[in-house]
Image (cartoon, rainbow, N blue to C red):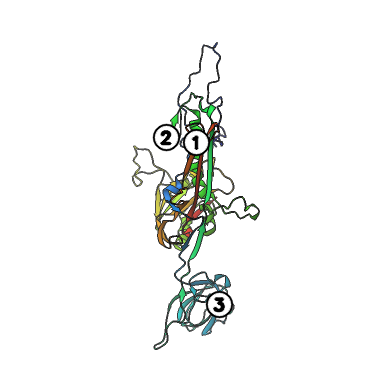
Amino acid sequence: MPVNATPGFDLQPSANQIPTNTNYITNFDFLSQYLPDTYEKEFERYGNRTLSSFLRMVGAEMPSNSDLIKWSEQGRLHTKYVDCTSSLDTGGNTATITVPAAQVGTSALVTTAGIAVRAGQTVMISSTLGGSNKAIVTAVRIDDREFDVAYYETAQAFAAGSTDLTVFIYGSEFKKGTNGMEGSLESEGEIFENKPIILKDKYAVSGSDMAQIGWVEVTTENGASGYLWYLKSEHETRLRFDDYLETAMIEAVPMANTNNAGLADGSEGVFYVVENRGNVWGGGNPTSLLEWDDVIKRLDKQGAIEENVVFVNRDFGFNIDDMLAEQNSYGSGGSSYGLFDNDKDMALNLGFTGFRRGYDFYKSDWKYLNDPTMRGGLKSGAVNGLLVPAGSTSVYDQVMGKNAKRPFLHVRYRASETEDRRYKTWITGSAGGAATSDKDAMEVHFLSERAVCTLGANNFFLFQA
């Protein structure tokens, strides 16, 4: 039987900036001999409501003194071209190979922009239709994206006009007494950048309302407690701002609408970067080892990071648990114990924290994807999980001017010797201890300026619904 629709859950903050009948006793009928029996402490019916923890688990925070953050990432070390064309019929001794224009400049480059092939190098040529040859490069015409090859084998495997050829360089060979290699290759790295955004929030309460004492003891997730009703709202504003510092880094997108460019610049959040430069699983969740093998094969073609953490919503977590349980000989017909350390006298553990198949995958529930007030329950644009490589990588920091070790995922905030904008908070007004203006109120301001850097996005995997 499905779960009933009621009771539901609140989608709006419960804290109010004014006293309400839920905060104070409103029954002042002194003729009544019965007064309400009230609990002094507020009941936390939604548990820990905060969402921020993801970036603290997988990344770090470090200062930046610029409004533009740039870094370069290594390109591929070896050269390979796909969808190349052969000019001669099957059976010839030589051929001319043409590289598609779209692939020029996607790997190490010759000093003159063009294909990264040089005379004397040896190549393997393969067709998706079957057959392969090995050959030596005899001439290169860089501007035309062409190079001539002479086959080692006696028969050529490809027909004229073949457009499905894959070519990669595996070495070189020169005759005795010949000159050295002509030309050189320059390393090509890709330069990425991101810009910080400014986040702000504010809580305000009048001096008169601060003088009213409530009758309910309130507490918040950061340990604040007391009997003043405004204390709860101020701390919840702070908690919401803390969550936004993380969720903004996850969800931010650059401003692509030129009509709105004057309103905001935007930034490249984690989801945006992985969608555009990383790997995306768009068919729901991988629920079998065969589907996970597809994920692993893709990771093989990327950085092949040994350890990875998969942050999942509840459904994805169940899918992984069920998949791993099926590997047990009794998984489909019942629950077993012993192999999985489940004793008959203890509660059965039906969950898994991770598994190894080619790489180590650690599973972690991500509250942000489950929370109904955020991404939980979305019908369109839902994200079921995110695979994040563990550890750090070496990148060339454009500001520092040297290589530096950085976590794959980390936050840069604006800071200098005189201004630190990682997390600023200040109080203005003339109430609550403030004495900065003649306004009869206390205003608590929050500000941060930050951006997230997603290094090696090709090693990330986004699992979309």
> Which comes before the other along the chain, label 3 or label 1?
3
Question: Residue under circle 2?
Answer: 223
Whether residue 14 is visible, yes or no, is: no
Question: Does dot 1 land on a helix, a strand or a loop?
Answer: helix
Residue 122 position, x and y percent, is 45, 79
Q: Helix, strand, or loop for circle 2? A: loop
Residue 236: mark: 1
Q: Tell me the amino acid under the disc marked 2.
A: Gly
Picture coordinates of residue 200, whole percent (x, y): 53, 44
Residue 282 falls in which quadrant of the image? Answer: bottom right
Amino acid type, callout 1: Glu
Query: Which residue is rendered at x = 38% and y = 44% of the image?
Result: 336
C-alpha span from label 3 to label 1: 62 Å
Q: Position of residue 149 (x, y in %)?
A: 50, 82
The residue singled out by tag 3 in the image is 145
Asked if 462 appears above or below 159 in the picture, the reply is above
| Mark closer to the chain start, 2 or 1 | 2
Give whichever of discs 2 and 3 has the lower sequence position: 3
Distance between mark 2 and mark 1 Cα atoms: 11 Å
Q: What is the x, y in percent for residue 40?
A: 45, 24
Label 3 environment density (alpha carbons within 10 Å; few <14, some 14–19, many ≥20): some
Q: Tell me which residue sits at (48%, 35%) in the image.
A: 235
Q: Residues within 10 Å of mark 1 (few under 14, many from 20)?
A: many
